[in-house]
Amino acid sequence: MELRTFGRDIAHIDLAAQTWEMRPAPEEWVRSYVGARGLGVRYVLEAGPEVEALSPDNLLCFMNGPLTGSETSMSGRWACVTKSPLTGTVTDSHQGGWSAARLRWAGFDGLVFEGRAEAPVYAFIEDGQIELRDASDLWGKNIHETIRILQERYGEKNLTVNAIGTAGEKLVRFAAWLNEDDRAFGRGGTGAVGGSKNLKAIVVRAGKKKSVVPDKDAWKAVRTRALDTIRDEANITSPKKGGLSVYGTNVLMNATNTIGALGTRNSQLTSFGDRAEKISGEYVEQNILVGNPTCHACPVACKKEVEIKEGPWKGLRMESVEYEPAWSLGANCDNDDVAAVAKLIDQCNDMGMDPIELGNAYSMWMEATEKGWVPDGQGLAWGDTQAMVALTEDVGARRGLGKALGEGPAKAAAEIGHPEIAMAVKGQALPAYDPRGLKGMGLGYATSNRGACHLRAYVAAAELGVVPIESDPLEWKGKGELVKTFQDLHAFSDSLDLCKFSAFAEDADVYAAQYATAMGIEFGPDDVMRTGERIYNLERHYNNLAGVEADTLPARYTEEASTEAGSKGHVSELSDMLAEYYAVRGWEDGVVPKAKLEELEVR
Amino acid sequence: MKLTFYATLRPIVGARTLDIELRCDATVQALIETLAERWPALREHLLTEEGGLSRRVNIFVAGRNVRWLDGAATRLDGQEEIDFFPPVAGG
């Protein structure tokens, strides 16, 4: 494989020396790991799995995929890959908007930051050049203000800014990077890694450029085929007709609530009852929706811009009330005030924090408060939105109680002697699908290589009847193979880098055709699955070398039965599912054996 | 029985919930045919061209998708709460 269309232009930026150089990715790495997630993990491995996440030696990679910034539908994405300060695993997080495309148009396939700048800097990128510029005037400012200042400095035309807020600067372990569209590299604490390197922002200025591909006609044909599947009115991606397009991701709230898979009050309950409607996508669409912004090359437009029209946060205009934070800061905190949810998400977007992690920290602390386990004067009552908003400022600034909660719910719960009330796997908090009502999702959380994550496998698509592969959400048998298949498929699509939602319409065959024509290579659906499996095993191998904890779930899900209709009486049969999963993976108790690494050519 | 409609199905029906009466010992099939007759725009969501249960709807009886019960042949006693969703998923 020649690096004709992707992989030649990887910038290595030494923050300590204030220098950079362009070095092509090794061809074998591109062939084996594709780009974005896979290629980023391979780079991060170079720093050694034992590296301290917040040390200068950790690498912080922003990687495009071979389809990023092209005319391919849903290709406006890139991956931030590093060792996580939250989990100790390798982690990758993906961001939409226009930043990824503009980086490609500016002449770069990826950025690899190493070292630590002596004083705060930002990277200014344009026309194949990178400059590290003084960010001392930006340090201490949050993201919205940072972006505004940089837009005033450089103009808004063709400009994109990614920044960390005070949370990243203060090394909150779930700090995030966000761009001007309020799109986040949300999970795993990549923003804290930026803060540890004194890297405040990445500014890219570049206008649109057409893709250079070996065969334009073949390229156009496969792109048209993919777009047709996305537009199909039978699919939830169908523009302005499908549920995802009309209501955004929060179309899920009422569905998981109905089947007893919506964790409530720190997952002590499995449904929010009638109150779920008040924080649902349907409610948002009817009452506060004002816009449907979209990412580069995406006809779906799942983002939902809202404006709060009354109450203490009247006038707040923000995007986007997504399903995950509406759950974590809503139902799981016993909060049905959608305006407060919007306010809390906007705070996270401004200070640069993962709202899934923050919401779980709050729900954990609320349960601890209820049980009398918190120090006097530090309690947080269920659904106390005023207190949540005030506390969020403290978490982002790492002061008072916010300092402890900024370590993430797992560490904060352990600190008060009750690790069992932290709903987390490998130190990362659970997302919005209760494993007692969606059993495959539970196995996906347990075996995710970046800590609890809904997106590694996303078998909810099968368990909720969205894709043709259907699977009873309450049946544990068969989930081992299902989870492996989805994990491998998504490891590949995350490496292209296509939006996860493309998988609601496209399949391995469509992915293969798009990749093959972009790169000018022979590549089929079997190659998609084998490459995805290789990437998944590379990540697991990294974690094995790093000494990451075992695949597990909090005991609440395996021992405390679901309380609500749809899943009532069910627990997660995790040990049975794990045995099945390890058998199909060929792993030995979660460890990739040497023979498997050789079989998959993991190098 | 109480029917609740969600997402893109709700504007078609024009209401969040409906109370309707079916004959005793009816099935999901009878229910969706009744609904398709009353709201013709629902038909393409509920029924295949052959008249079976469409993949464009997920129907939950007491929180269980009828696909994991007896499908369109699932029997109803008239007292259930039934929820109608188009396929939904997200991040």
Image: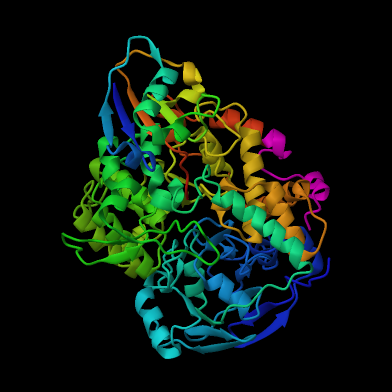
Colour mode? rainbow
Q: Quadrant of the N terminus of chain A?
A: bottom right
In the displayed structure image, the side of residue B55 where residue A397 appears, left or right: left
Q: Is residue A142 visible?
A: no
What count of labels does the image hold? 0
Q: Residue furthest left?
A: A311
Tell me where residue A165 appears, x and y as whole percent: 39, 73
Task: Please identify the quadrant where the C terminus of chain A is shown.
Answer: bottom right
Q: Nearer the viewer, residue A102 or A478?
A: A102
Q: Is residue A562 left or right of residue A479?
A: left
Residue A205 % position (x, y): 53, 83
Q: Residue at x 62, y 66 (%)?
A: A71
Q: Which residues are magenta?
A: A582-603
On the question of residue A301 being in view, the answer is: yes
The answer to whether residue A593 is magenta is yes
Q: Residue at x 62, y 48 (%)?
A: A506
Above or below residue A223? Residue A366 is above
**Is residue A549 depicted above or below A17 in this figure?**
above
Where is residue A4? Give x, y as percent.
78, 72
Q: Is residue A543 above or below residue B29?
A: below
Image quarter for residue A518? bottom right
Q: Residue furthest top?
A: B25
- Front-most of A222 and A64? A222
User: Percent from the top left, x then y, of residue A154?
Assistant: 45, 89
